Image: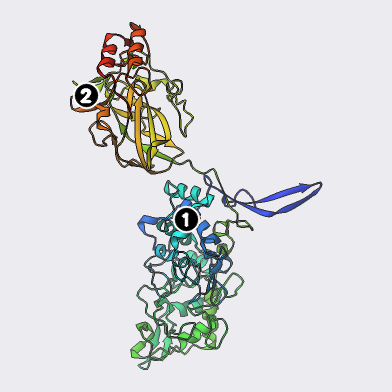
């Protein structure tokens, strides 16, 4: 291993005792979220034109990384012993060398299809019988299959909801889902999106065929890097056969290109049955019209990666290999329902009459379609250690954004619907939030917010800063349970912004959810929304306490001035109630200037007007 290897690292713990170094029996697997493998921008040859990736699920590094973890996680089975990768193994081009794969409650009904280059096709239905309308839809069906991974909800087995709860208790999923989706919520749809991204990322374009096509740029030209036998086999693959009236081939090629077109070698979406209609149980199974890409049928050593066809077993027993496939297409059976018309020339099942030499030639060509990297690339390998452990480091911080509007009665001017910013213009505003010093309780936040720089207070006009406010988020199930607080800046026009004076307010360490939103000022009473408000990493709406867009829990806890709602002024003792203590504060600080809680109209001076406001608003309480 060295620095150029993919950054999704497998770190071997080396323990040195004396002069002896040995590898720990625990292989620690780490995903470093800021340094993910490159899945999104892998090089793709210019001659590859087919792509079934939907616009709403383009491959991303974090999406494919989460998909990789899901793909290899045995916890996604009821027995904690089976993963998607159990039946789709990297060393066999993401297939299974067994004829049928073993699940938690038996075996699969069909052979496990190779997944290499699943993205590069016009066909976007999946499974042999195309019952899944997309790769996304396909990914969670094996998880919910009673035989395969067990979360079927049938015969006493748990359903998918049980799996989701199980995953919610797994630490690394909270970090990974948050990194991909902005919050830790786990749903089946989100699982599907991530796993589909990972599977589509598995690609193989380093075969001898790719090198040859890159040299000449034309499928029909001889490839300089091919042997004569391989070029002859290529021609057999590409050229259509010539049939007589009885369906007997009398010339031309084998016609493989008609259903498995190069250079992707994917299945034509309009293909019918290939004539092999028997199931693994011997019963009829005529619904299979899908196949994987023909790339990497063989591995780099020339060995068959896995059995072919949906049944996996040859008619005479054993593994269905490439010779068996040639035998099948050489003599298509009679009376096959849903048979592809291309296999019934002139109304008769085809007879290709493949010679022994043609068999050798086409086999040699098929070997040129196998690469090497797909079998060893770490980005597609098992991210878990030998004990099933996985660690996510440098996880992104959960957060939500809030666009809040509020007006304070004290400085509000109904003539222009703006608040006066005398404290700012008199250079009285503190660079640090005042609420921690006043004894306000900080929740899920250390407090101590500071303006980004002094120029924040230089802005004039409606966007000028007039003071700090204190904002809180409350539990959606209990508006009295404050779960996060922030000090923020308030503009003259009522907009609440972060410490740079521009950005909307951000709450760290809380995830997207529904919240009751509360706000108060050091000498104005607190209000909170009557209903929960959905907050996320993007702004979906405004929390507006000015125009009754977001009504407060108790309407009387706001005053109306002109046509605007404002917070009650007069809480000079900042105890969320306007009472005798506040009137005493305005009297004790009479004729005093500065940044004062008793200056309830916020003009920088404590005088008779402040005492009048406090008297007029007596006995008001905040929420």
117 relative to 97, above or below: above
- On the question of residue 45 being in view, the answer is no
Residue under pointer 1: 165
Which numbered disc, 2 or 1, marks the residue closer to the eye? 1
The image position of residue 218, as x and y in percent, is: 43, 68
Q: Quadrant of the C terminus?
A: top left
Outermost residue, top direction? 591
Q: Residues within 10 Å of mark 2 (few under 14, many from 20)?
A: some
What x and y, as percent, mark residue 496?
A: 33, 29
**Residue 357 x %, y %:** 54, 86
Q: Residue at x 45, y 26 (%)?
A: 449
Q: Is residue 456 left or right of residue 384?
A: left
Query: Please, which colouring scheme is shown?
Result: rainbow
Q: Distance of mark 2 from mark 1, alpha carbons?
A: 50 Å
Of residues 79 and 51, the one nearer the viewer is 79
Asked whether the viewer can see residue 421, the reply is yes
Please tell me in which quadrant of the rendered image residue 137 appears.
Answer: bottom left
Find residue 417 and name its label. Answer: 2
Q: Residue at x 39, y 33 (%)?
A: 472
- At horizontal 50% and vertical 70% (from top left) the residue drawn is 148
């Amino acid at each position: 291993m060295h620095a150029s290897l993919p950054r999704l690292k497998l770190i071997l713990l080396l323990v040195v005792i004396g002069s002896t170094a040995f590898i720990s029996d625990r292989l620690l697997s780490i995903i470093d979220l800021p340094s993910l493998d490159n899945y999104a921008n892998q090089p793709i040859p210019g001659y590859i034109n087919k792509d079934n990736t939907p616009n709403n699920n383009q491959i991303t590094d974090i999406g494919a990384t989460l998909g990789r973890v899901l793909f290899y996680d045995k916890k996604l089975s009821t027995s904690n012993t089976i993963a998607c990768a159990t039946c789709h193994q990297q060393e066999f081009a993401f297939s299974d060398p067994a004829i049928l794969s073993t699940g938690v409650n038996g075996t699969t009904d069909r052979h496990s299809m190779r997944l290499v280059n699943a993205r590069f096709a016009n066909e976007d239905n999946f499974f042999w019988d195309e019952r899944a309308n997309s790769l996304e839809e396909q990914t969670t069906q094996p998880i919910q299959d009673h035989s395969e991974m067990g979360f079927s909800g049938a015969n006493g087995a748990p359903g998918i909801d049980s799996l989701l709860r199980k995953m919610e208790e797994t630490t690394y999923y909270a970090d990974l889902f948050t990194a991909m989706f902005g919050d830790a919520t786990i749903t089946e749809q989100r699982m599907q999106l991530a796993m589909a991204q990972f599977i589509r990322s598995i690609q193989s374009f380093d075969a001898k065929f790719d090198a040859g096509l890159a040299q000449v740029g034309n499928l029909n030209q001889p490839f300089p890097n091919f042997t004569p036998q391989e070029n002859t086999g290529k021609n057999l693959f590409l050229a259509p056969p010539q049939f007589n009236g009885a369906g007997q081939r009398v010339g031309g090629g084998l016609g493989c290109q008609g259903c498995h077109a190069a250079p992707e070698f994917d299945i034509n979406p309009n293909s019918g049955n290939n004539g092999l209609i028997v199931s693994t149980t011997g019963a009829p199974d005529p619904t299979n019209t899908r196949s994987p890409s023909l790339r990497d049928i063989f591995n780099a050593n020339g060995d068959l990666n896995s059995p072919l066809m949906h049944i996996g077993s040859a008619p005479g027993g054993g593994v269905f290999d490439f010779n068996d496939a040639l035998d099948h297409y050489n003599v298509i059976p009679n009376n096959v329902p849903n048979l592809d018309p291309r296999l019934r020339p002139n109304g008769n099942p085809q007879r290709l009459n493949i010679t022994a030499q043609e068999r050798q030639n086409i086999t040699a060509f098929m070997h040129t379609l196998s690469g090497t990297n797909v079998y060893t690339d770490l980005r597609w390998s098992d991210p878990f250690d030998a004990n099933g452990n996985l660690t996510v480091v440098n996880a992104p911080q959960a957060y939500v954004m809030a666009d809040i509007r509020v007006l304070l009665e004290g400085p509000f001017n109904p003539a222009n619907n703006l608040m006066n910013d005398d404290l700012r213009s008199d250079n009285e505003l503190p660079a640090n939030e005042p609420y921690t010093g006043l004894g306000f309780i900080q929740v899920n936040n250390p407090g101590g917010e500071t303006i980004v720089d002094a120029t924040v207070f230089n802005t004039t006009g409606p966007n000028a800063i007039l003071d700090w406010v204190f904002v809180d988020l409350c539990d959606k199930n209990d508006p009295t349970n404050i779960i996060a607080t922030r000090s923020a800046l308030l503009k003259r026009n009522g907009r609440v912004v972060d410490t740079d004076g521009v950005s909307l307010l951000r709450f760290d360490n809380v995830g997207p959810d529904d919240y009751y939103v509360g706000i108060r000022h050091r000498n104005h009473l607190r209000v909170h929304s009557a209903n929960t408000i959905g907050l996320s990493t993007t702004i979906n709406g405004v929390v507006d306490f000015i125009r009754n867009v977001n009504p407060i829990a108790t309407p009387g806890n706001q005053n109306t001035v002109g046509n605007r709602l404002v917070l009650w002024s007069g809480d000079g003792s900042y105890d969320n109630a306007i009472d005798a203590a506040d009137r005493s504060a305005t009297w004790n600080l009479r004729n005093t200037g500065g940044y004062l809680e008793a200056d309830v109209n916020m003009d920088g001076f404590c005088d008779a007007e402040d005492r009048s406001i406090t008297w007029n608003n007596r006995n008001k309480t905040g929420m």
